[in-house]
Image: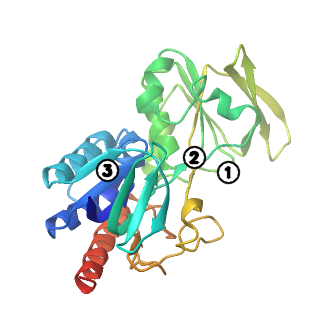
Amino acid sequence: MLYDIVIVGGGPAGLTAAVYALRAGRSVVVVEKNGFGGQIAFSPKVENIPGTIQISGAEFADKLVEQAMNLGADMELEAVTHIEKTESGFTVFTEEGSEFCGKTVILALGVKHRMLGLEGEYELIGNGISFCAVCDGAFYTDQEVAMVGGGNSALQEALLLSEVCSKVTIVQNLADFTGEKKLAEAIAEKDNVEVFFNTVVTSYQTADGALTGLTLKNEQTGEISELKVDGAFLAVGLMPENDAFAQFVPLNNWGYFDCGEDCLTPTPGLFVAGDCRSKRIRQVVTASADGAVAATAACMYLDQNK
């Protein structure tokens, strides 16, 4: 089947693009490698979506998926490896061996969790290192954990963990939190949350392949200490995975698609949307805005190239 639009990525940007394209009468397939909804699905509480006082990220993601499917979107859970330009548009290839053909493509790839880059880190994922308190917090009920990071995500996750864990230690490399003041104030009210500022993790301590603690360094004093924990949650930022598409869309120095607010690329018929694009603010509302812009641009392209 030749779709009007193949959307790579099923987060807020990709799903919003699907909604706008489907409402314009276009045929759409959304190809997502991990789980529909994107990073927002892991947020325990979202309070900055206009018109919504409070909603869990998972509920918001479910509503987006339901909306796109009710409008007729095809949804495929496969990992896209690369795309090729064809006479009729593009072919999108996946690890599973599928090929999706589209007259246009919207890349809404999102971002992935950034790691600390320490020895043995990848082997500890699922063996003491986690990224999502909603997903894994219950495994550490009445245990001690660390939260590495000091932004909004880290503080939200730490608050959630404080409800189930006996102790939460926040390790922040800066002299203060970078998250919202409201979240920082909520952290300060928690008796079972301790904060180490100006501190970095220098290594992981393990036993039998599982995490048992962290080696910490205070960057102001140079003091080295050990923190015994049952688990550690990382919230130290996100990074794009755009390299496979660099031949079609230029990347900036940080690996993001170097495209503007119009979501256009130098390759006709190819558009980008969401956190994978170079931008100053990465929030669910800006991702959804990109999805609307990219879908509208794709529809205009289709009208002009009938």
Q: Which amino acid type corresponds to the residue marked 2 in the rendered image?
A: Gly
Q: Is residue 107 visible?
A: no
Please give the residue where the numbered disc 1 appears in the rendered image.
174
Q: Earlier in the sequence, mark 2 or mark 3?
A: 3
Residue 97, image x and y in percent? 45, 45
Image-quadrant location for residue 292: bottom left
Instruction: Locate residue 287, reporting x and y percent.
Output: 37, 62
| Mark 2 element type | loop
Q: Residues within 10 Å of mark 2 (few under 14, many from 20)?
A: many
Q: In terms of secondary structure, where does tag 1 sit?
A: loop
Q: Which residue shows up at 38% across the image and 79% down it? A: 262
Tell me the residue that label 3 is attached to.
Answer: 47
Determine crowd level at label 3: few under 14, some 14-19, many 20+ residues with C-alpha closer than 10 A.
Answer: few
**For residue 169, what is the image quadrant?**
top right
Q: Which residue is mark 2?
A: 150
In front of the other: 77 or 168: 77
Residue 57: x, y in percent? 33, 43
Image position of 3 (left or right of 235): left
**Residue density around tag 1, few if under 14, some if 14–19, many if 20 or more, within 10 Å:** some
Residue at image point 53% right, 72% down: 248
**Rounded to the nearest whole Å, what is the CA distance between mark 2 and mark 3?**
18 Å
Left or right: residue 155 compared with residue 290: right
In front of the other: 66 or 32: 32
Where is the C terminus found, in terms of image quarters? bottom left
Q: Amino acid at mark 1?
A: Leu
Tell me if I can see residue 223 in this picture.
yes
Q: Residue type at mark 3?
A: Glu
Q: Is residue 238 left or right of residue 269?
A: right
